[in-house]
């Protein structure tokens, strides 16, 4: 829908019906708010856009996969979240007071919003891990360094036959198990690692690389491969696997990039455009 068309119909409040930002009979235009936020907070706006895109990917994916969240785990997450908030309150402060002060809503509504977010996040993880299960996968030992020379030194040692275990002690990130070993990952990993893995064999060491937008040098040692599964995994199997091996940032990025391709989505920087009027009438005759 074009901007001209959008301006000729009732514009819902960007902040909810109970907190409409108004001047006289005019309401704040959501697009104007977002445009200003993107200019003032470009990195935060990019991160928010990504979260919203991810949410839509999850909705589309789960129309196909039909997964349901684990209710017991959701109740536990909600209880822990409530306890954490409670522990940071002042002695005379209630959850209702905190919720009203922070969000302008009673605690029961904020709690329900938290429950919805926890459920969405669990469905997201189930969808992402289901995608990983159906891809060919690789297990890596990964060393992370701020120094390019150290990364090249690691490569020389590994290619001379050194045990990759030494990466755990020298790397900035020893991995989830402390041995520099990563959980099973889809081979379709972010650039440049995904391209470097093509045709690799177990025991092979990759050249040092840097992910776009980062300054850390990484060295990967290929441990082993396995083929993806043909059948769609059950939610219970995925949940058990996620409990033992939480979703990693590499796996999450690989899934996101795959969804960009699957749904022909475009992710780019918010452009700087001519300023729109910030406030417009709620409706037109």
Image: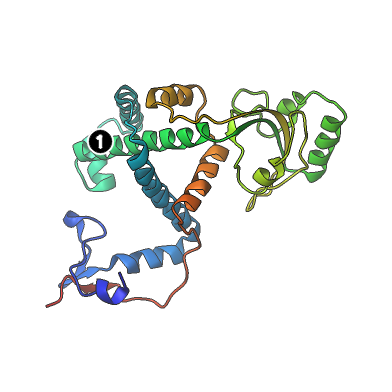
Residue 47 screen position, x and y as percent: 46, 52
Judging by the rendered image, the residue that carries numbered circle 1 is: 111
The image quarter containing residue 218 is top right
Against 219, residue 12 (above or below) is: below
Residue 197 is left or right of residue 252, and the answer is right
Tell me what residue is drawn at x 43 percent, y 35 percent.
125
Residue 29 screen position, x and y as percent: 27, 68
The image quarter containing residue 206 is top right
Query: The C terminus appears in which quarter of the rendering?
Result: bottom left
Residue 64 screen position, x and y as percent: 36, 40
- The residue closer to the viewer here, 180 or 53, is 53
- The residue closer to the viewer here, 200 or 41, is 200
Tell me what residue is drawn at x 73 percent, y 43 percent.
146
The image quarter containing residue 107 is top left
Secondary structure found at label 1: helix
Q: Residues within 10 Å of mark 1 (few under 14, many from 20)?
A: some
Query: The N terminus appears in which quarter of the rendering?
Result: bottom left
- The residue closer to the viewer here, 252 or 62, is 62
């Amino acid at each position: 829908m074009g901007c001209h068309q959008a301006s000729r119909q009732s514009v819902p409040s960007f902040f909810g019906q109970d907190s409409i930002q108004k001047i006289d009979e005019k309401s704040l235009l959501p697009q104007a708010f977002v445009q200003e936020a993107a200019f003032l907070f470009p990195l935060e706006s990019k991160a928010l856009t990504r979260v919203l895109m991810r949410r839509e990917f999850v909705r589309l994916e789960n129309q196909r996969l039909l997964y349901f969240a684990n209710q017991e785990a959701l109740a536990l997450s909600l209880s822990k979240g409530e306890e954490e908030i409670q522990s940071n309150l002042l002695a005379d402060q209630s959850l209702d007071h905190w919720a009203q002060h922070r969000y302008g809503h009673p605690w029961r509504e904020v709690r329900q919003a938290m429950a919805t977010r926890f459920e969405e996040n669990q469905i997201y993880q189930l969808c992402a891990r289901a995608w990983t299960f159906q891809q060919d996968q690789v297990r890596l030992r990964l060393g992370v360094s701020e120094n390019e020379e150290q990364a090249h030194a690691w490569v020389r040692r590994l290619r001379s036959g050194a045990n990759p275990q030494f990466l755990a002690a020298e790397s900035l990130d020893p991995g989830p198990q402390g041995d520099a070993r990563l959980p099973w990952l889809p081979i379709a990993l972010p650039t440049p690692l995904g391209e470097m893995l093509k045709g690799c064999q177990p025991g092979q060491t990759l050249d040092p690389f840097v992910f776009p937008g980062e300054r850390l040098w990484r060295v990967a040692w290929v441990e082993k491969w396995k083929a993806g599964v043909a059948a769609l995994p059950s939610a219970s199997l995925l949940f058990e696997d996620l409990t033992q091996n939480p979703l990693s940032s590499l796996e999450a990025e690989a899934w996101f990039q795959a969804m960009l391709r699957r749904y022909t989505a475009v992710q780019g920087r918010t452009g700087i455009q001519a300023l729109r009027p910030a406030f417009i009438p709620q409706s037109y005759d």
